[in-house]
Amino acid sequence: MVDKKPKNDGLRIQLKGLRSMHDLRAMLHLAVDELEALPITHARGINLYLTPADKEANPVYPRKNRRPVADITIEEPYRSAADEHGL
């Protein structure tokens, strides 16, 4: 019998309520603070799902160049010049 690695079901992070993008950014920072306090040092397979809405909670259908936007992929974090030069 082959030993299998235990399945990692991941960790759910739930951000409740209708929020502005400013509030969302602050809540994401709080979530990362919670992760670091566990202490979790790295993450992979990160997915964030949200329902775009206006300030009255009505659905919004984002478009770019007249085409619907269904997903946004960020390949790597922004690296400042100081990061690049080890400062």
Image: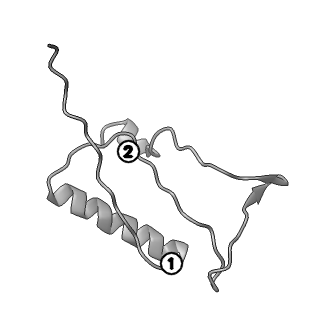
Q: Residue at x 37, y 66 (%)?
A: 14
- Observer-nearest residue: 39 or 79? 39
Q: Is residue 44 left or right of residue 68?
A: left
The image quadrant where one finds the C terminus is top left
Relative image position of residue 19 (x, y in whole percent)? 50, 78
Q: Residue at x 25, y 63 (%)?
A: 33
Q: Is residue 66 left or right of residue 41?
A: right
* Kind of element beneath mark 1: loop
The answer to whether residue 11 is above or below residue 17 is above
Residue holding disc 2: 82
Relative image position of residue 3 (x, y in whole percent)? 14, 19
Task: Tell me if mark 2 has few (under 14), some (14-19) or many (20+) residues whose alpha carbon lies within 10 angstroms of its own.
Answer: few
Disc nearer the start of the sequence (1/2): 1
Relative image position of residue 34 (x, y in whole percent)? 23, 63
Q: Which mark is residue 33?
A: none
Task: Indicate the amino acid at tag 2.
Answer: Ala
Say which of marks 1 and 2 sits in front: 1
Relative image position of residue 30 (x, y in whole percent)? 31, 68
- Observer-nearest residue: 29 or 1? 1
Q: Residue at x 19, y 23 (%)?
A: 4
Task: Tell me if mark 1 has few (under 14), some (14-19) or many (20+) residues whose alpha carbon lies within 10 angstroms of its own.
Answer: some
Q: Which mark is residue 19?
A: 1
The answer to whether residue 71 is above or below residue 17 is above
Q: Is residue 39 left or right of residue 66?
A: left
* Kind of element beneath mark 2: helix
Q: Is residue 20 left or right of residue 45?
A: right
